Amino acid sequence: MRHLYTFQLIEAVARAGSMRKAAEDMNLTASALTRRIQRFEEEFGAKLFERLSNGVRLNSAGELLLHHYRATLSDLARVQGQVADLTGERRGHVSIACSQALLPYFLPEQIARYRSDHPGVTFSVNVRDRTQAEQELATYSSDLALVFEPVYLVDFEVLHVVPQSVNVVMAADHPLGRKREIRLRDCLDVPHVAPSVKYGVRHLMDFAARRGSRRVDPVVETESFELIRHYVLHEKLIGFQIPIGLRGYADGTLVYRPISEKDMPPGNLILGQTRGRTLPVASARFALQLATALKDYQAAA
């Protein structure tokens, strides 16, 4: 325990890339911070940072040590949660990296439901693309990830999978809304707004378009799914999202329809954690709640 503050300082330097900037962030003098880290390096028996012309960065030993620190914090939080459970009053903190699609409805409902039973538990919701979400798990920055079409699945333990068809989002009076079946070629032949290439929806669209010797060529490309939902009401074009984030938007002004599976099979919305990690009690039980809720959502759909 006595080294935890020193670990926090090391993490601050790694994040800032500079002793001086990290000292400012931690409300220390640069000399005091440097001395403390040097004393730790002497006791530890290895240098932790590589000195650069414009700052510092972790060397291999430093990266290993920082990974150990984050794992230690995770274990400590798990034990604290178990102790809180012994007293009958659950406390703790849950951090989750998620796709934007989960923000309007699904996650707010699930967090509120969990906190109604366990008001001592706090949450961090980190909006990440599919690559960032996996990185968050690997660095212990998030306990759970709920993301559409993860990229690597390295050390990713899948807890639940829900298929999601890519849906066309459009104003209620758009001509495509009257079609019984929307084909991918119908979408590519009209002006469209699409997510940027780092998102799972765009990955599936690009792959399906290439199979038909076509390409996705949006007039507006964005990292914001909220912008997509609003922009289609301002210009006669279409957008693309997955349905779990669209549930409450069919209000007479906005409609959404799936692209035919003949052209684009559904992708996967995946709930997961780092493989082999024992989660803190609050996070583990929230994961169980999410898995159950996703099963119910899938059955209803």
Image (cartoon, rainbow, N blue to C red):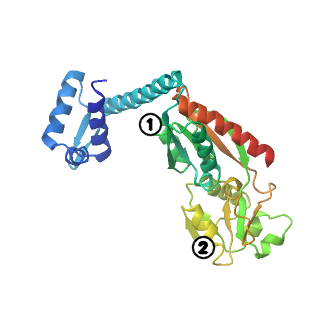
Looking at the rendered image, the disc whose residue lies closer to the viewer, 2 or 1, is: 1
Disc marking residue 120 = none
Residue 139: give its label: 1
Q: Which residue is mark 2?
A: 219
Q: CA distance from mark 2 to mark 1?
A: 36 Å
Residue situated in front as seen by the camera: 52 or 31: 31
Residue 261, given in percent of the width and then of the height, sits at: 80, 54
Give me the residue at 75% from left, 42% from top.
Answer: 296
Task: Give the x, y percent position of residue 160.
Answer: 68, 37
Position of the N terminus, as image quadrant, is top left
The answer to which of marks 2 and 1 sits earlier in the sequence is 1
Question: Is 8 positioned to the left or the right of 145 in the image?
Answer: left
Q: Secondary structure at mark 1?
A: loop
Up the image or down, 193 lies above or below 133; here it is below
Q: Residue furthest left?
A: 31
Badge 2 marks a residue whose secondary structure is loop
Q: Amino acid at mark 1?
A: Thr
**Front position in the image: 107 or 64:** 107
Q: Quadrant of residue 185?
A: bottom right
